[in-house]
Image (spheres, helix red, strand yellow):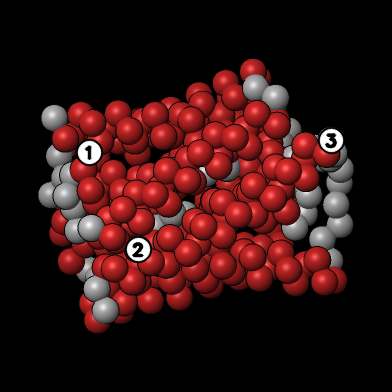
Amino acid sequence: MEAIIALSIILVTAFVFAPLGLGGGFLFVPTLYFILGWELQLSIVCSLILVWFVSIGSRRAHDEGGFTVAGVGRKGRIVAIGGAIIGALAADRIIAEAGESVIKILAIILLSLVIYRGIKKLIEEQKNDIQDEEIIVEGALLYKYKLGCLAGGLSAGLIGIGGGVIFTMLNRIVLGLGPHKAAGTSYLIVMRVVPVAIVSHLLFNPSLIDEIIKFNTITLALPLIVLVTAWAGAKTAIRIFPQRALTYPYLVAVSISFLRYLMDLIN
């Protein structure tokens, strides 16, 4: 029963979150950890694998709709990749020496900041129309963007959320992109950052490879199913929903994850 529940959550998450610029990691990790009872670091790595395939499927759908800004994505990739390596190393050390609670506290802090900035952005958009103009990323703006990408990479390696939650909000707040372009451009970075975070985790803790090899065929095939599901979800949302409507499920999804981590920490 737990496996069916987890599978349902994973597929629904991939479908619903793909158009939001969210790989779904902040729900994948709790699903694998709380429902299936996997160890936290294994949950983080497997979440990253799922996030990677979500990003591939969703990026394809956003590309087809003209909602990716390749020049912007390239500017933040290198620092984000560096952050992912540092984050993976930090996660391995923190879990080994300080326990899993520290990771949960960091996740709560990160998600609370994202919720705050997301609500602030939503209020601003109620007063003004969404602007989706071309933007030149250089100077002080480029510095702020790279700093945010570094934070996104760190979060990907450290808590397994893939960084999309940060990259998307970064594209909205710092660059002023509309929801569709913010999401599509986010996946340009996630697709490069997440594989590095996965490999880093496996290098720092090779025992995780043995755990993954033990999975059955259905579990091993799940990333491909998630890829198709994410493509379908992004394609559907781009065609049907107005851009402003995507901000609300984004905030709801982040809030649910925040509450789940908080409840677990308190208990």
Q: Position of residue 156 (x, y in %)?
A: 46, 61
In 3D space, how far apart are the residues under numbered discs 2 and 1 (Cα atoms)?
25 Å
Q: Work out which residue is located at the far top of the displayed protein and give it.
A: 240
Relative depth, front residue between 149 and 225: 149
Q: Which residue is mark 1?
A: 219
Q: Whole-Å distance between the Cαs marked 1 and 3?
A: 44 Å
Quadrant, the C terminus = bottom left
The residue under the point 23% across, 48% down is: 34
Q: Quadrant of residue 91?
A: bottom left
Residue at disc 1, secondary structure? helix
Horizontal placement of 102 versus 217: left or right? right
On the image, the x and y values in percent for residue 231 come to 51, 29
Mark carried by residue 129: 3
Q: Amino acid at mark 1?
A: Thr
The answer to whether residue 148 is above or below residue 136 is below
**Contact between labelled residues 1 and 2, with CB atoms less than 8 Å apart:** no
Residue at point 73%, 53% (across, down): 173
Residue at the extreme bottom of the image, as rendered:
97
